Image (tube, rainbow, N blue to C red):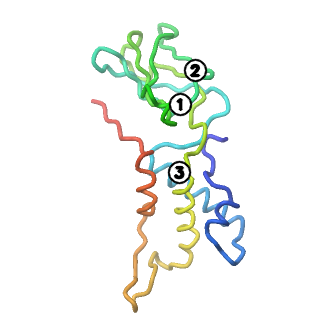
């Protein structure tokens, strides 16, 4: 799986839209890609994975006498290495502790000593990402892609009919049902002083 894949295939999307007419494959591919990126933006994360370990740099912050590093999503310890300017760190905890048992990624490292809090001093090399796209994310992507495909039939962002009172303005955000499906997968916004 790629780092930023389309979360649904054109075949899955064709089946989802229940179209009796042949929808162009390029249109389906574009809708799947656009919906996947909308899901990423809504969740403030992506659901792909890198093929080989990649180095990324982070800043540690003090939290109750230990150093905590908020990291990108990580579901595999294959190739995992943590270093600071003083050298490798071999003693650390991945958090949340029960993430793997819950089918979720680790999003933090807890280190008792080594970092100083200097910007970007913690280097983490890992195979970043999710091992599989969660079913709710696939479903949300299908729903959003379907909305994008049918957007061409709603000129000026208006769907429905004013004459029968069903007029609806389509806003520049994900479908409300998509937002509900993705809520458990949305990363919080971290603000550090």
The residue at the point 46 percent across, 23 percent down is 94
Q: Distance between the residues labelled 3 and 2?
A: 26 Å
Q: How far apart are marks 1 and 2 (CA)?
A: 10 Å
Q: In what quadrant of the picture does the N terminus appear?
A: top right
Residue at which label 3 appears: 137
Q: What element carries label 3?
A: helix
Location of residue 129 by image quarter: top right
Q: Is residue 104 placed above or below 170 in the rendered structure? A: above
Image x and y of residue 110, in percent:
40, 19
Q: Is mark 2 on a helix, strand or loop?
A: loop
Farthest residue to the bottom: give it.
163
The residue at the point 61 percent across, 56 percent down is 33
- Near mark 2 (Cα within 10 A), the count class, few <14, some 14-19 or many ≥20, is some
Image x and y of residue 35, in percent:
55, 58
Residue at which label 1 appears: 74
The residue at the point 61 percent across, 58 percent down is 32
Earlier in the chain: of badge 1 and badge 2, it is 1
Location of residue 59 by image quarter: top left
- Near mark 1 (Cα within 10 A), the count class, few <14, some 14-19 or many ≥20, is many
Farthest residue to the front: give it.
101
Front label number (1 vs 3): 3
Q: How far apart are marks 1 and 3 (CA)?
A: 17 Å
Residue at which label 2 appears: 80
Q: Is residue 114 left or right of residue 9?
A: left
Q: Do the residues labelled 1 and 2 touch (CB within 8 Å)?
A: yes
């Amino acid at each position: 799986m790629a780092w930023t894949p389309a979360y649904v295939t054109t075949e899955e999307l064709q089946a989802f839209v229940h179209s009796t007419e042949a929808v162009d494959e390029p249109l389906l591919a574009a809708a799947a890609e656009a919906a996947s990126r909308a899901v990423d933006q809504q969740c403030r994360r992506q659901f792909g994975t890198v093929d080989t370990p990649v180095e990324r740099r982070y800043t540690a912050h003090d939290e109750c006498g230990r150093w905590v590093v908020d990291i990108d999503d990580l579901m595999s310890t294959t190739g995992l290495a943590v270093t600071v300017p003083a050298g490798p760190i071999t003693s650390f905890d991945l958090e949340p502790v029960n993430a793997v048992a819950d089918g979720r990624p680790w999003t933090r490292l807890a280190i008792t000593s080594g970092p100083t809090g200097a910007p970007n001093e913690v280097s983490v090399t890992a195979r970043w990402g999710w091992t599989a796209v969660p079913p709710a994310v696939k479903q949300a992507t299908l729903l959003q892609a379907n909305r994008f495909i049918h957007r061409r039939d709603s000129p000026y962002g208006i769907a429905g009919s004013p004459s029968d009172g069903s007029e609806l303005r389509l806003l520049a955000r994900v479908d409300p049902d998509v937002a509900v499906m993705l809520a458990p997968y949305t990363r919080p916004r971290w603000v550090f002083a």
